[in-house]
Image (cartoon, rainbow, N blue to C red):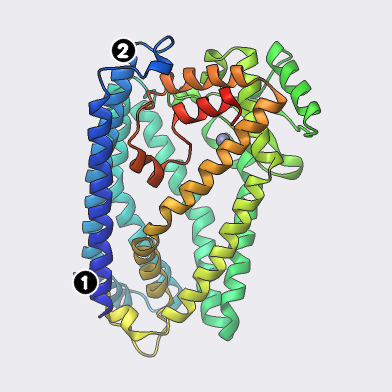
Amino acid sequence: MFTLWFIAFLFADLATRAWVASRQMRHVLRHRDQVPAEFADRIGLRSHQRAADYTLAKVRLGMVETLVEAALLVVLTLLGGLQWLDLQWGRAIDSEMWRQLALIGSVVAIVGLVGLPFSVWRKFGLEARFGFNRVTPRLFVADLAKGLLLTLLLGAPLVALVLWVMGNAGQHWIWWAWAVWVGFNFLVIWLFPTVIAPLFNKFTPLQNTDVAERVNALAQRCGFRLNGLFVMDGSRRSAHGNAYFTGFGRNRRIVFFDTLLARLDPTEIEAVLAHELGHFKHRHIIKRMAVSFAAALGFFALLGWLAQQVWFYTGLGVIPQLGRPNDALALILFFLVVPVFTFWVTPLASWFSRRDEFQADRYAASQSSADALVSALVKLYDDNAATLTPDPVHSAFYDSHPPAALRIQKLRHGA
Ligand SMILES: [Zn+2]
């Protein structure tokens, strides 16, 4: 019975994704030959068409990747992949902990290997074709090795601890596992700006320029205590530009991509930063963390229940072994299968995210300049080849940021 539900949801997901993707492609194609009137004075037809082609290429690649991922999911579950792996490791390893870690590690490795060709194609095919990629094959391999090392150093102890808690903390293990998860998240957020991010990029303090002066004045006006302004060599990997906040407490800093600094003038940079400060002022980041921790508790409770149900295993092509822990199996099945059901929450999460973006825009307009933010946005959309004419349904479903036209309209008319 559960098998049927799983298959039904998987097909509904795929059908919905395909339908929304095809809407997006048709909509973008239909508007490919005309720059929307409100952008016509600032964006040329050629860049508009380049953005359309880039969007189409991304949607196509995304669809192929979705299909391959779904196929892998079916191979691992219903077609017996996991069951086979579990039997092999059961024969090879006696220690329960190492056996379970090996099982999880091998599934993570398989999922990673299947995803690898897509990330290669994305960087060296798609992004390169549109002139965004700056990653050399050598850097790609170095990044991959570092990512792998980080996964081992941070991920393996986390998984081992959760498995240990599941096996040894009694019936209240859910709370302990949750505490481990929350602690781990704080650790990563704490380590990210000073330890993890510098493994991949160089960060240099922003020197006493016009930009630094403006940003410091803005932060003071907004009552935000700055612990550092940094420039990141984002141009090492990509021509896309960005700015972000990172860390908390004394580790808090603002990071500008060098690509962003190169393209925007000081008033525009100030406006972009005011938008970021808006997220901070409205506590979006803290609220999002609270929601994600509450959701994690719910998921652990669900996992605790599902792990006890025989149908959860057998319905997904695995026969749990009696007389030994099946925690690793339960964890893997849970993380593989739950997204199939939670896919339907995507539009809701996107809606909340877009609401936050409007709030941050309003804050930026009040603390800085709406016009400067508009001109920064237009430049960023243009540079990043982001489409100005997304399909409304696609946008409602997936977009974390509102469509450019809508954002600009609200900024201009203060709605
Ligand atoms: Zn934002």
Q: Amino acid at mark 1?
A: Gly
Comparing labels 1 and 2, the label whose residue is closer to the camera: 2
Residue 316 in view: yes
Query: For this rendering, which residue is in front, 5 or 328?
Result: 5
Residue 246 horizontal side relative to residue 110, left or right = right
x, y percent for residue 142: 42, 35
Residue 317 in view: no
Residue 123 quadrant: top left
Residue 272 quadrant: top right
- Residue at position x 77%, y 31% from top? 222
- Kindly tell me whether mark 1's CB lies below 8 Å from ligand 1: no
- Kindly tell me whether mark 2's CB lies below 8 Å from ligand 1: no
Residue 373 quadrant: top right
Q: CA distance from mark 1 to mark 2?
A: 52 Å
The residue identified by callout 1 is 80
x, y percent for residue 330: 40, 74
Mark number for residue 45? 2
- Residue at position x 59%, y 12% from top? 265
Q: Amino acid at mark 2?
A: Leu
Q: Secondary structure at mark 2?
A: helix
Q: Earlier in the sequence, mark 1 or mark 2?
A: 2
Residue projecting furthest to the left:
79
- Residue at position x 38%, y 58% from top? 344
Q: Is residue 268 above or below residue 69?
A: above
Q: Is residue 281 above or below residue 388?
A: below
